[in-house]
Image (cartoon, grey):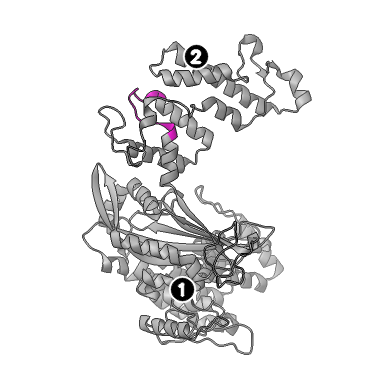
Amino acid sequence: FDCVNYNSLCPFVGVSANASRQKEFRHRQRQLLYNSSHNQHSTNPRFDSAIGDNINNDPTVCDLNENQSDSLDTTSDTDSEDDHYYNISMDDTSDNDDLFTQADGDLHNTKPLYFNSNITVEQAYIYICDYISEFKLTLVQQKRLILLLILLLPNDSLLNQKHLSKWMSVKNSFTYSVLCAHCTNILDTKTGICSILCPMNGKLRTDDGIIETCLADIKGSMSRVAERNIDLIMEYPKQAKFLVPNDIINGTIYQRDATNDPTITIQLHSDGFDILTTKHKHCYATTATILEIPPPLRDYAQNKILLSLYFSKKEPTPECLLNNLIKRLDELRTIGLTVINSNKKINFKIKFQGDKNDQPCRSLKWKISQFNGFDACTNCLQHGETRNSNMVYYPYTTNPTPRTQQMYLNAARMADSRTTVTQHAIVQGIKGTSPLLKIFDNVSEHALFDYMHACCGSSGHMAHVLRRWITSASANVAQSMSDFILNIMMPHDTKVSFKLLSQIDWWKSKDYRFFLLYISMPFAINYVPHQVTSHYVLFFISIRILHYYQYRTDIDYADMFIDNYRKELANIYGHDWDLYTNHLFRYFPSQVKNNGRAMLK
């Protein structure tokens, strides 16, 4: 199309001025790149050819001179034209196309990237893929990056766009499976065949009748994260006691199992969430974290390892959710993980410490009763009581009977033996043997309690306490409370924005957490009765100690404070506050001793 004046075109086609400037800017970039590549007589003829041919054949490129500085074409503003311009022909028959022939056997090419290069072709591909993943480049941006690298590298470089794409598809592979929602066996979606014993066998299914699962290349994903953080993984465990005394590396369990061999310790996390608003379906994601990476780096998205996904209208069973994943993890623990650092191979042992989930997901994975059921605690045998209501209460007791690992296993086996096709047996709150027992040897140590939702969730303890304070105050005092919250000057690096107390139902867990740790004590001193404040300070100090302790002996004080807080809780707020979430406070100090403050996130 010929370029036309923007002022005359805009009223008819309705193109915004911003879109016009962006398109003009892209045209200028193309022209400058074309002129630059020819004026400097580039030494890469294949690149020149690709760029020149695309520019000469691109109908959207205009001759931007002084008389047409504000010109605009009428083609749609989409990524397709960028794709057309920046694409190197896949039919290119240069020598680089022989990089991964059938004679080479596989994609693990250990040739130097170019003559006298310090890295191999495979390592170069790893670095490029990690960069693309870290900065979430679009397809067009990926092509631009690759073309730029080809332009800058020597002529004998083995970097090739076609085979880089092939390498990425292999290295980032996921195993996708479709299961029958009735029998959970592999389903042939074309014929509807699953299991000869399934009543739905041979029948075509709708989306509601299938289960979709996705299992990552765990070894490859873990290798990439470990390779990217190899120096931290090797050095941080040696310096952790000086740098972060309250980290999980200094906890009892990690130190007890520590060896002199290179080790990677994995912590699991699962969560369920909704991705559709029109139809309710269950979606679960399981991720992993390498504990040898120091905080806060270990919690960055680029260092999180996606292990598996589950998507279906049917609520998952522990076996369907975990069996294949646990099998892969157990195999990885057996063979270990090899990471290349400076052309040296480092063989890591794989260990597992901690499975952190919210209460519903924890109950699902470990096959235990929900928080509103009997015998829901994995650390003791307190049964709970209903008090002629539909709630189960766990009143304060001094010394509940501990639940040992052997007690848990015996109850799980008995529940398995009593379970039938139509009825699931529950023995002392245990519904059967969890697949997680194949990689974790102690439930009370590794099935971490959910601090975030128990204390800071919208139905957690801090939310209940704050609501009670608000409803017990007069209208004027409640307004003063709200003004106090809104007038707080937040630190510039804090991503918390409080709403009015009248909109407390819209507060998020991070809001309650920030309020608990930094605002709740001065708030209580100003607006809450003295007796209630004197009681609340026990909870506040204990949680602050568990978050920020420097010496392990400080945790004993937190244990004493939180025990006294629980003891007087019913006297201050009433016996209907004897909930399971408050029962969990008893075990927070011991879990922090075992796992550091990491269990409080």
Q: Is residue 446 visible?
A: yes
- Residue numbers of the magenta segment: 151-162
Query: Horizontal and vertical percent for residue 503?
Result: 67, 61
Q: State the image quarter where residue 29 is shown.
A: top right
Q: Secondary structure at mark 1?
A: helix
* Horizontal side of residue 308 vs 329, given as left or right: right
Residue at the right extreme? 12
Q: Residues within 10 Å of mark 1 (few under 14, many from 20)?
A: many
Query: Horizontal and vertical percent for residue 296?
Result: 40, 53
What number is the disc on residue 366?
1
Quarter in which the N terminus is drawn: top right
Q: Secondary structure at mark 2?
A: helix
Residue at the bottom extreme? 388
Query: Horizontal and vertical percent for residue 408?
Result: 41, 82
Tell me the kind of residue under disc 1.
Answer: Trp
What number is the disc on residue 385?
none
The answer to if 288 sits in the magenta stretch is: no
Query: Horizontal and vertical percent for residue 415?
Result: 47, 84
In the picture of the structure, the residue carrying the numbered disc 2 is 35
What residue do we see at 56% from left, 27% from top?
84
- Say which of 364 and 71 sits in front: 364
- Say which of 283 and 424 sits in front: 424
- Say which of 244 and 62 sits in front: 62
* Horizontal side of residue 109 vs 571, given as left or right: left
What residue do we see at 40% from left, 78% from top?
560
Q: Who comes first in sequence, dot 1 or dot 2?
A: 2
Query: Above or below — where is 182 with respect to 225?
Result: below
- Say which of 243 and 265 sits in front: 265
- Name the magenta segment's main secondary structure: loop
Q: Is residue 245 visible?
A: no
Mark pair 1, 2: CA separation: 65 Å
Tell me the kind of residue under disc 2.
Answer: Asn
